[in-house]
Amino acid sequence: MEPQEQHQEPVNDGLQKQEQHKKHKEKKKERLLDFLRAAPSKAPCRREGLCRLLHARLLRLDLLAGLSSLLLRALTSSALHLHALRVHCLLPNPSHLTFPIALKSASRLPHPLRAGEQLHARSLKLPSHTNPHVLTSLLSLYAKCGLLHRAQRVFDEMPHPSTVPWTALITAYMDAGDLREAVHVARNAFANGMRPDSFTAVRVLTACARVADLATGETVWRAAEQEGVAQSVFVATAAVDLYVKCGEMAKAREVFDKMRHKDAVAWGAMVGGYASNGHPREALDLFLAMQAEGMKPDCYAVVGALSACTRLGALDLGRQAIRMVDWDEFLDNPVLGTALIDMYAKCGSTVEAWVVFQQMRKKDIIVWNAMILGLGMTGHEKIAFALVGQMEKSGVKLNDNTFIGLLCSCTHTGLIQDGRRYFHNMTKLYHISPRIEHYGCMVDLLSRAGLLQEAHQLVDDMPMPANAVILGALLGGCKIHRNTELAEHVLKQLILLEPWNSGNYVMLSNIYSNRGRWEDAAKLRLDMKAKGVEKVPACSWVEFEGKVHEFRVGDKSHPLSDQIYKKLDELGLEMKTMGYEPTTEVVMFDVEDEEKEHTLVHHSEKLAIAFNLLVTGPGETIRVTKNLRVCSDCHTAIKLVSRITHREIIVRDNNRFHCFRDGSCSCNDYW
């Protein structure tokens, strides 16, 4: 018995030592695991050294295979991509867990294709190749290399793709700029039963918004609601953006109002959407509501608000919006700076626009063009021409929009020879092919100057079919110079292009009325009525104490209507003593002269000016914005009002600016 006891003791010692060694190794493994998990959170300089040290220890302890995925993740997070790929090469049988990490590292190399192809070739020899995570990573790598056909082939290898690979393929086409194919893939995905997560919903809604595919976008939005991800602020904002881009502002507002949490991006999408879809009053109301909620506006909200102020001529509200943004942002952000220059210029404050332009630290071509166009619209064509020279000296290359600004300057001031020269030079000297907008400027310039045959010939010689803007410019010249025959010819083409545009009928009716052809005018009105065409009502807006006031012809809905009409009567008496006689020929209908005069007195811009005279102090500038062109009678009357009241009156119609001072207008009666 004694010898056996002596033999048993060394055996137990050996087992204990093995157990202790095993526990010691497990503790080391646990410590290494903790290090690996913590490595990505370290500072970059410490992270690299730590990862290399861990790699060496794993090799020494023969733990590389067991902890390879953690080590690879740590190396990838530390931007040690080549090191990660070398580690992956040491693995005898890399799994479906390590391949995606290695492919991620490969995709972040400056030239990822070669490493990606090597990993792809290696995966083909292993069972992990068919794993959806591996295939999705391959898809993303080929997409990053711009090889969409390979990405599509990899995707086609998946028998039952989940949401993740569908999203990866959609994203691949979006990143390549092929948005229509991205939407097409999304339609197939939903047809095959894919249910979106929040990331997928945002990507697909964004793609649909960019191509204005409302039907597919609404399908995605309904699916997002069913999956419970519609409450995400990112998904809901993407849906708002979709409806905004498709012009469905009522639906956009419905989604917006249901959002529990609205960030600055969501507010900005709605404000900008109202502004871009022709609802400036709603844009400003929402912008003011945003302020009341204490939400700081982002760039898009401010640009939307400034655009709305531009549309309504609400200069003071625009200044209020500006105060919500640090001034340096305007000077450093060309988007904000351009919006501000445009607002100041189109509200008639060219001096303030010029100050912003001069102070801007970042001026891209869009900023230069905005200033040139603003100067041209407000009758400062000489400064606009000089600015183009300064632009070239600064090394900024003129583009097609620069010449639109120059041609508009010529149009608004009747500079025919300059207009011809710029139109010729843009092709011959700058090698810029004229767009239809350039032809439109030239047709407008020639038509207003009475060169109708030259304008008509230019329309016939255009390399593209004339659109409604081109023909409308020619028709406007026919109206000014009473060329009924050419007007009738142009109108027939316009009716084919836009049969429901009342402006075409009204313009021809005015021509008939001016010629005394009342029967033809009446017949045209009956034709409009039979087709259900309604005349767009003339509207004028003025801003007072942060509120925009709207007036229409003969409008008596304003609280101060009695005083407004009394003021108009007083002005009318003073104007008649100065020799003013109403230009009754601009009235469309065949009525008695006395009734025509009554109609002219109550045009919307006259009501707006009378209101401003009542509520503002002596010497204050009056600013009026109108949705249609100012008629010749109002133009004459406002010149006299500016002399009587000693006020500067700035009227922006749908075509240009008129700055009335002491009985004269900045347009020199050319509009």
Image (spheres, rainbow, N blue to C red):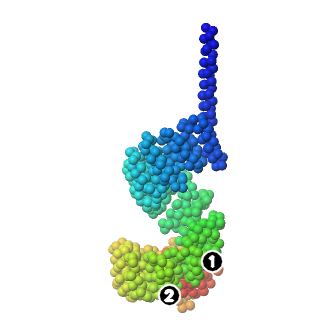
State the image quarter where residue 542 is shown: bottom right
In terms of sequence position, does the residue under pointer 1 or pointer 2 come before the other?
A: 1
Task: Identify the secondary structure beneath mark 1.
Answer: helix
The residue sitting at 50% across, 87% down in the picture is 417
Image location (x, y in percent) of residue 567: 57, 80
Locate residue 88 relative to residue 213 in the image: left or right.
right
User: Who is closer to the viewer here, 259 or 489?
Assistant: 489
The residue sitting at 56% across, 82% down in the picture is 385
- When the figure is inspected, residue 525 is found, relative to residue 228, above or below; the finding is below
> Looking at numbered disc 1 in the image, what kind of residue is underneath it?
Val
Locate residue 592 relative to residue 531 in the image: left or right.
right
| Distance between the alpha carbons at the discs numbered 1 and 2 | 28 Å
Locate residue 416 relative to residue 58 in the image: left or right.
left
The residue sitting at 41% across, 83% down in the picture is 458
> Looking at numbered disc 2 in the image, what kind of residue is underneath it?
Gln
User: Who is closer to the viewer here, 457 or 23?
Assistant: 23
Can you see residue 249? no
- When the figure is inspected, residue 641 is found, relative to residue 155, above or below; the finding is below
The residue that mark 1 highlights is 351
Image location (x, y in percent) of residue 613: 60, 78
Image location (x, y in percent) of residue 3: 62, 10
As drawn, the label of residue 161 is none
The residue that mark 2 highlights is 417
- When the figure is inspected, residue 29 is found, relative to residue 245, above or below; the finding is above
Q: Residues within 10 Å of mark 2 (few under 14, many from 20)?
A: few
Asked if labels 2 and 1 touch by Cβ distance under 8 angstroms, the answer is: no
The residue sitting at 38% across, 84% down in the picture is 487
Q: Considering the image in quadrants, where does the N terminus appear?
A: top right
Question: What is the count of numbered marks?
Answer: 2
State the image quarter where residue 644 is shown: bottom right
- When the figure is inspected, residue 427 is found, relative to residue 32, above or below; the finding is below
User: Who is closer to the viewer here, 561 or 112?
Assistant: 112
